[in-house]
Amino acid sequence: KLSPRLQAVANLVPKGSRMADIGSDHAYLPAALLQAGQIDFAVVGEVAEGPLQNAEHTVKSQGLTDQVVCRLADGLAAIEASDAVDTVVIAGMGGLLIEKILTAGVPAAKFSRLILQPNTDQAAVRAWLVGHHYKISHEEIVQEGRHRYEMLVAEPGEEQLTAAQITFGPHLLKDQDPVFLTKWQLEYERINGVLDRLAAAGQEASDKYQKLQAQAKQIQEEVF
Ligand code: SAM
């Protein structure tokens, strides 16, 4: 059974897609999708030996070797043209790493669906998508334990997003999910705590203070 986070990612993979899971580690996601009959082929990409072995173990022990190709590769280099991959999943990594993987690989190949789950720096991923002819068709936020995870689905297309939409997510901002509101409430409180400490130290004129104050204002104006 998948964790709530990975299940939420799995739910975004269309039936019958040819998927690549980049940075798959245990290959739990493709294995669950294959077992559920949701997909019938997957490429598993891993840059590190240990996680690749984890993936190979899952694939063998679940009898999925005919349907999964595991490759040791950096990012999208795991995907070969003959795989005819249409859906790329990159989940469970920092947003800046996801951005780096996309930058290194996407100009060579266009995919009809990117499913991205950045643990941090979601805004950087959104900005990358908008700048590289992808539009964000769907977003979700899911709580697992103490953590909140965002997922973005992108498809080829053009769109312009406002600064607030890049920061908070165009769909998330509109949907106002309680998990989303909690995330930004906590961030707002965290920033205000730092502002209080800086003010107590007489740092109101510092760049850091000004920047955080602007962030708090943006949250208050755009989210609440
Ligand atoms: N995708 C799974 C998930 O969401 O549960 C596993 C996430 S795991 C925290 C991140 C994995 O990404 C690690 O196994 C790491 O080796 C792999 N990774 C990091 N950089 C990578 C890259 N450039 N190309 C492929 N895999 C990478």
Image (tube, rainbow, N blue to C red):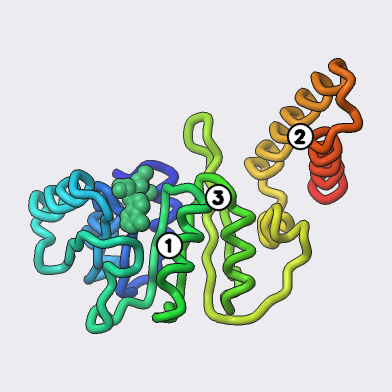
Left or right of residue 4, residue 95 in this image: right
Picture quarter with the N terminus? top left
Q: Earlier in the sequence, mark 2 or mark 3?
A: 3
Q: Label 1, on which residue?
A: 101
Q: Which mark is residue 150?
A: 3
What's under tag 1, amino acid-wise? Ile
Q: Nearer the viewer, residue 121 or 44?
A: 121
Q: Is mark 1 within 8 Å of ligand 1?
A: yes
What's under tag 3, amino acid-wise? Glu
What's under tag 2, amino acid-wise? Tyr
Q: Which residue is drawn at the image coordinates 66% and 44% (left, top)?
A: 180
Note whether 147 is above or below 171 in the view shown. above
Q: Percent from the top left, x then y, of residue 85?
A: 32, 76
**Nearer the camera: disc 1 or disc 2:** 1
Q: Which mark is residue 47?
A: none
Q: Give how far apart the Cα atoms at labels 1 and 3 are.
A: 18 Å
Badge 3 element: strand
Picture quarter with the C terminus? top right
Q: Residues within 10 Å of mark 1 (few under 14, many from 20)?
A: some
Q: Give how far apart the Cα atoms at labels 2 and 3 are.
A: 18 Å
Q: Is mark 2 within 8 Å of ligand 1?
A: no
Q: Percent from the top left, x then y, of residue 124?
A: 61, 57
Q: Which residue is drawn at the image coordinates 70% and 62% (left, top)?
A: 170
Badge 2 element: helix
Note whether 224 is above or below 161 in the view shown. above
Q: Earlier in the sequence, mark 1 or mark 3?
A: 1
Q: Is mark 2 in CB contact (under 8 Å) with mark 3? A: no
Badge 1 element: helix
Q: Which residue is drawn at the image coordinates 46% and 66% (left, top)?
A: 102
Q: Is mark 1 in CB contact (under 8 Å) with mark 2? A: no
Q: Label 2, on which residue?
A: 188
Q: Give how far apart the Cα atoms at labels 1 and 2 are.
A: 30 Å
